[in-house]
Image: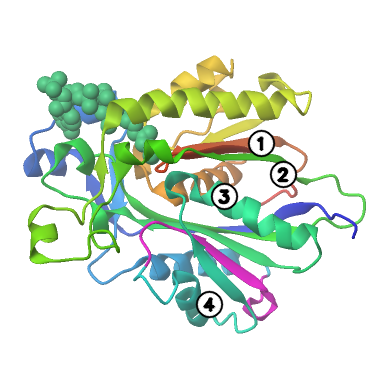
Amino acid sequence: MNKLRTTITAIGKYTPKRILANPELEKMVDTTDEWIRTRTGVIERHIVEKGEATSDMGAAAFEDMKNRFSVDPLDIDLIIVATVTPDMFFPSTAAIIQHSIGAKNAWGFDLSAACSGFLYALVAGLQFIETGQHQKVLIFGADTMSSITDYTDRNTCVLFGDAASVVLLESTKGNDDSGIIDSIVKMDGAGQKYLYMAGGGSKNPPTHETIDKKMHYLYQEGRPVFKFAVSKMVETATEILERNSLTGQDITLFVPHQANIRIINACASKLKLKDEQVMRNIDKYANTTAATIPLGLIEAMDEKRIKKGDIILLTAFGGGFTWGSILLRWGFNYG
Ligand code: UT7
């Protein structure tokens, strides 16, 4: 079977209307705007309204995609939703989104890889395009982090926000050389103890006790996660550049996962990138887990920072631990 090349042909985003800015958090926990800005880079984050779920944000992101590009939901073959905050255990958020957007001919599934979820889902989705099994695959990165955040814990509540973004994958046409060039995805389950949500699953089914112990909220030991994040993101970014005979100078834009501005800056400096080569929007959205990278891509597109033919490097690190890098050549001009 001939291997086809996969490219992103459309993109959409949604961020909830309600904004939770640092001064409001100062009233909720023992923190300061100054600490949050300097230690994380976050100024504000978007938070869903009560009752608004991950699938609602995903459907709204698809609506944005439809408003920008010509996409017919009936043409979609497969929906993959990268999320750690599904609407519920089952049915999958993919099934719920399939129904709400009217993608009647699609099958799909959820994929759990925390902050690396979007990269994992891209790699999963492109297999179906490259083998010719499917023509149109939707990849969602969507997380309602506010649903698993303890707003009395200053160690975590300042870090996260809610958002969804979606890309459409198709094969490249003719001799177009755009598309996903290479990918590296990694996992090390030894890292599970540093970043997790213990309650609610089969290990600790929900009881009054698990609720009292706040096990339904995410837990993070920030320092080791920080250390691993920088070293693993730089490691895969360097490896993917080297094995494609490229250097940092060859890429137009580095779109890293947005967990901490100090992680982003450390990676950029180790990769010897100039400021204008690095996507940073953590100030506006905080860490939106699986949504950060596609949100970075669409904002870069809207800001005209990327055009057809540009080389883009995506890199993420998250719970699991999971991490990876994807190298791609952008396929279109927008606006
Ligand atoms: O997206 C998935 C992957 N996640 C990440 O990549 C996150 C990686 N980790 C981080 O970004 C950082 O470790 C954090 C932002 C979570 C924490 O920053 P840090 O510089 O590593 O701080 P720390 O945890 O070492 O804490 C330093 C101090 C502590 O006080 P003491 O023990 O020194 O008195 C904390 O209690 O800062 C305190 N602290 C705060 N102070 C004010 C922690 N959170 C806050 C806060 N406001 N919100």
Identify residue for label 2.
330
* Distance between mark 4 and mark 2 Cα atoms: 27 Å
* Element on which disc 1 rests: strand
Give the image location of residue 40, x and y in percent. Answer: 31, 29
* Distance between mark 1 and mark 4 Cα atoms: 29 Å
As drawn, is 161 to the left or to the right of 293?
Answer: left
Q: Which mark is nearer the camera, 1 or 3?
A: 3
State which region is magenta: 71-86
* Element on which disc 3 rests: helix
Confirm or deny contact between disc 2 and disc 1 (CB under 8 A). Answer: yes
Give the image location of residue 238, x and y in percent. Answer: 63, 23
Question: How packed is label 1: few (under 14 Cα within 10 Å), some, or many (20 or more)?
Answer: many
The residue at 60%/76% (across/down) is 107
* Distance between mark 2 and mark 1 Cα atoms: 7 Å
Q: Residue type at mark 2: give it.
A: Trp
Q: Does the beta carbon at disc 3 come under 8 Å from ligand 1?
A: no
Identify residue for label 4.
98
Q: How is the image coloured?
A: rainbow
The residue at 92%/55% (across/down) is 174
Q: Earlier in the sequence, mark 3 or mark 2?
A: 3
